Image: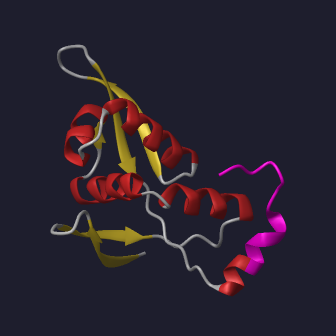
Amino acid sequence: MRLTHRQILLDDLSYVSYFFHVKQKDGYDGDQLLAALAALANVHRLRVIAALAAGGRNYVSQLAREVGISRPLLHLHLMKLEQAGLVTSQMELSADGKALNYYEVQNFAFALTPAAIAAAAPSLTSKTEI
């Protein structure tokens, strides 16, 4: 693992800078690579990843306020990110007995090169949906 610095543009004026450890996987199969790239191809999902990377794990209501979208819309984006393996969730009970669904970003790194795409392409299945 290595410590990496990232800076993500949240809007025209604000950036989030953060550090995280990148653990390189040996590679993604075609379906995993396609799911991850599709999940990241949305401004709201990029903002969710940035918020979780900068602030750590968070529950849905607070994360929706931070990102500036409704909870139902956030749930849809979190579901797509979770299906791609980019975030994980865990349900916990608060001190007052409320169920809170916490999300946290998973470490990931992509070396998106022609060679990486060529290696992943043979494992693509026809059932893959974006």
Q: Where, by quadrant of the figure, is residue 33 drawn?
A: bottom right
Relative to the observer, which residue lies in front, 73 or 28? Answer: 73
23 lies left or right of 12: right
Residue 118 in the image, given as x and y percentages of width and height: 76, 80
Q: How many numbered badges does the structure rendering display?
A: 0
| Residue in the picture at 25% in, 32% down | 61
Residue 123 included in the magenta stretch of the image? yes
20 lies left or right of 12: right
Residue 17 sits above or below residue 111 on the image = above
* Residue projecting furthest to the top: 97
How are the colours assigned in the image?
secondary structure
Q: Where, by quadrant of the figure, is residue 70 drawn?
A: top left
Residue 1 in the image, given as x and y percentages of width and height: 43, 75
| Residue in the picture at 44% in, 62% down | 107
Span shown in magenta: 118-130
Relative to the observer, which residue lies in front, 41 or 30? Answer: 41
Q: Where, by quadrant of the figure, is residue 101 drawn?
A: top left
122 lies left or right of 15: right
Residue 11 included in the magenta stretch of the image? no
Residue 17 sits above or below residue 72 on the image = below
Residue 58 in the image, given as x and y percentages of width and height: 27, 41
* Residue projecting furthest to the front: 12
121 lies left or right of 22: right
Residue 93 sits above or below residue 127 on the image = above
Relative to the observer, which residue lies in front, 63 or 10? Answer: 10
Residue 4 in the image, given as x and y percentages of width and height: 33, 78
| Residue in the picture at 64% in, 73% down | 26
| Residue in the picture at 46% in, 37% down | 76
